[in-house]
Image (tube, rainbow, N blue to C red):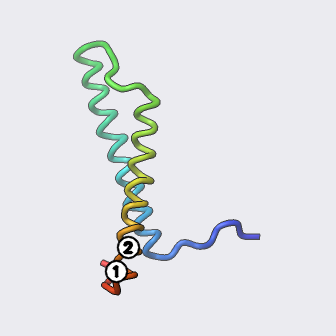
Amino acid sequence: MIFFRKMTASEKRTAAKGYQTGFLIYLLLTFANYFYFLLTDQALLSPGILFWAGLLGAFGYEAILNFKQRRRKAAGTSDK
């Protein structure tokens, strides 16, 4: 029994872009938090904020890309 449908090639592409964006958000926020800690001995961001910022960045960007793609497809323009 399949609970989820298979992703199309364009959905896989937008998901990969979203995951890369989420990783970059984690990387940049962790970098900023670490160097702030080195300078002040206090954390700039809590671990919860770091976690949710990365997740929301990844899935939010993926949702935006999927929305743009569906809108372009409905208008009849190319996929790129």
> What is the residue that sits farthest to the right in this orientation?
1
Above or below, 30 against 74 in this view is above
For badge 1, the amino acid type reads: Asp
Q: How far across and down, in percent of the image, does residue 8 sit? A: 50, 76
Residue shown at the point (45%, 39%) measured from the top left: 52
Q: How far across and down, in percent of the image, does residue 51 sit? A: 45, 37
Q: How far across and down, in percent of the image, does residue 4 sit? A: 65, 67
Q: Earlier in the sequence, mark 2 or mark 1?
A: 2
Q: Which residue is mark 2?
A: 69
Please state, as top left, top right, bottom left or bottom right, where the C terminus lies in the image: bottom left
Above or below, 36 against 12 in this view is above
- Mark 1 residue element: loop
Q: Which residue is mark 1?
A: 79
- Mark 2 residue element: helix
Residue shown at the point (36%, 26%) measured from the top left: 45
> What is the residue that sits farthest to the left in this orientation?
39
